[in-house]
Image (cartoon, grey):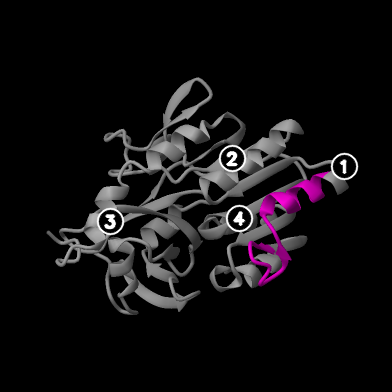
Amino acid sequence: MNTIISKDILSPSIKRYVIKNSKIAAKAEAGQFIILRVHEKGERIPLTIADYDREKGTVAIVFQEVGNTTQKLGEMEVGDKILDFVGPLGVPTTLPQGDNIVCIGGGMGIAPIYPEVKSLYNKGVKVTGVLGARTKDILFFSNEMDKICDKLYIVTDDGSQGRKGFVTDVLRDIIKNDNKIDGVIAVGPLPMMKAVCDITKVHNIPTIVSLNSLMVDGTGMCGGCRVTIGDEVKFACIDGPSFDGLKVDFDEQMRRLKMYKEEEEKVLGCKCGGEC
């Protein structure tokens, strides 16, 4: 249980692990996540379930080495066991209704958008995919997405692969050229999701986003992942992480994500590697 059975290096800092855990694989749905802990003194971090195979009893996660825990996780190899691997947590994404859906994944948001596109594809829904990254070196899953999208657009900030620009540039063109878009799913950095919703709100297109709020326990007890949706306070761990993007207070979310920057920098510079 919790054994790493495959490790793929998608870029120098991005890795994909397939983990053996038949209990989680049996119940996992698109949009849900797990919480893991690498060692006894380690922090608990949430990671979206990037794929699952019920028959094989496996769950895939994709992560970028940006903090102490993800760096420690990235050092693990096939055959190693992750100490704690809990899930599936959160509410499965309520997919937009209709036959013509646009799915946008930006940066690490490509990982959680993938199982959602698979779910739509298996239902026979027409999916237009848009994948964005700063550069081609950190772009992943383009081949996998191409197999399950009716049309796939690639965009990079520097133009190193696909179109130069942003996912919002492509979204504007799709809306201009398509008479009927039934819904949009967007997962990625908060500024990207906010920019997408600013566009879809004007056209009254239902939009689902996934919020990567600060999270500790994943059960709604700590209150750290609270988000404002319309005039209601919700918790990303038990009410989400997927929400109606047209109601999300993105400015509040961006402020909250900056709360522990100083502490994160101290841990990264700590000689004990974050185990103290």
Mark 3 neighbour density, 10 Å: few (under 14) some (14–19) many (20 or more): few
Describe the element under mark 3 as helix, strand or loop: helix
Describe the element under mark 1 as helix, strand or loop: loop
Q: Is label 4 or label 3 in front?
A: 3
Give the percent coordinates (x, y) of residue 171. Answer: 74, 49
Name the kind of residue labelled 1 in the image: Asn
User: Does label 3 or label 1 sit earlier along the sequence?
Assistant: 1
The answer for how far apart the CA atoms under marks 3 and 1 are is 48 Å
- The image quadrant where one finds the C terminus is bottom left
Which region of the structure is painted magenta?
155-175
Name the kind of residue labelled 2 in the image: Lys
Mark 1 neighbour density, 10 Å: few (under 14) some (14–19) many (20 or more): few
Query: Disc 4, disc 3: CB below 8 Å?
Result: no
Give the percent coordinates (x, y) of residue 54. Answer: 48, 62
Describe the element under mark 2 as helix, strand or loop: helix
At x 68% / y 68%, what residue is drawn? 159
Name the kind of residue labelled 4 in the image: Gly
User: Does label 4 or label 1 sit earlier along the sequence?
Assistant: 4
Mark 2 neighbour density, 10 Å: few (under 14) some (14–19) many (20 or more): many
What number is the disc on residue 265?
3
User: Does label 2 or label 1 sit earlier along the sequence?
Assistant: 1
Q: Is label 3 or label 2 in front?
A: 3
User: Does label 4 or label 3 sit earlier along the sequence?
Assistant: 4
Query: Disc 3, disc 1: CB below 8 Å?
Result: no
Give the percent coordinates (x, y) of residue 135. Answer: 59, 68
